Image (spheres, rainbow, N blue to C red):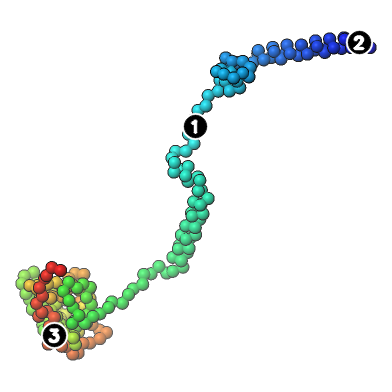
Amino acid sequence: MRKKSERIFAADSARRDSQAIRADWAKSLPRKGKGKGKGKGKGKGKTQGKTKTWEKKRNSVALAAGELDSAQTMAAIEKLDKRVETSRRRSLESDGTPKLTKPKFVKVSSIQPDRKGINIYAKVVKAPVSVGEGGLSEVVVGDETGIVTLSLRNADQVAICEVGKTLRIQNTRVIMIKNYIRVNVDKWAALKLATELTVNDVNEKTDVSATEYELTES
């Protein structure tokens, strides 16, 4: 049986051998800094040899702000997608044909200066008369409220303006000739014989084109 002093000596020898092995192993590792140990100060401590750098995370502040409310953004996108889908579904369910509205026809006596889009049914009171140059003709038409003078340039339209015939006149506009009203049947207007109704009585006492107007500043 070994004596106690021998066991202590053997333990001390083993500890010294272990320390020597650790020291040799530490020397074999590459050194990261000039300092040693855990002391404080320049060149010492665990952080020696390490450099902090800035790395790009986003390209704009907007992206950073967007990330903060990404949940709200996604909710808004989902809501918009639902609205678009609903609109698309309704569009597919409909036939896609635009609804046509019936033209509104007015009476001759309601025609005023600078009025546009005039639709009237009127009876030819006087035959067309050629005025000026460029093939311009005028014809007097009317209904039970009054008469008015049309300005025509289309020879085919002039040809159908026979006295006693009822005309369907659409999308015309008023032009002022020497301060008097003329209903201009231009290329955008339509003039043809009416087949759906007939104007019988005409009030020739009220001549819309016989009233002189004066242009004033308001």
Q: Secondary structure at mark 3?
A: loop
Q: Residue at x 27, y 78 (%)?
A: 104
**Residue 3 picture quarter:** top right
Looking at the figure, which quarter contains the N terminus?
top right
Would you say residue 78 is visible in this rendering? yes
In the displayed structure, 163 sits above or below 183; it is below
**Mark 2 surroundings: few (<14), some (14-19) or many (≥20) residues within 10 A:** few
Nearer mark to the viewer, of 3 and 2:
2
Q: Work out how far the residue at label 3 is from the one at label 2, CA to CA, in angstroms.
A: 149 Å
Name the residue that disc number 2 marks: 3
**Mark 3 surroundings: few (<14), some (14-19) or many (≥20) residues within 10 A:** some
In the image shown, does 116 or 20 lie closer to the viewer?
20
Nearer mark to the viewer, of 2 and 1:
2
Name the residue that disc number 3 marks: 206
**Residue 103 picture quarter:** bottom left
Residue type at mark 1 is Glu
Q: Earlier in the sequence, mark 3 or mark 2?
A: 2
Label number found at residue 55: 1
Place of residue 132 in the rendered image (x, y in percent of width and height, measured from the top left): 5, 72
Nearer mark to the viewer, of 3 and 1:
1
Would you say residue 168 is visible in this rendering? no
In the image shown, does 178 or 101 lie closer to the viewer?
178
Place of residue 143 in the rendered image (x, y in percent of width and height, measured from the top left): 18, 85
Residue type at mark 3 is Thr
In the displayed structure, 147 sits above or below 133; it is below
Q: Earlier in the sequence, mark 3 or mark 1?
A: 1
Residue type at mark 2 is Lys
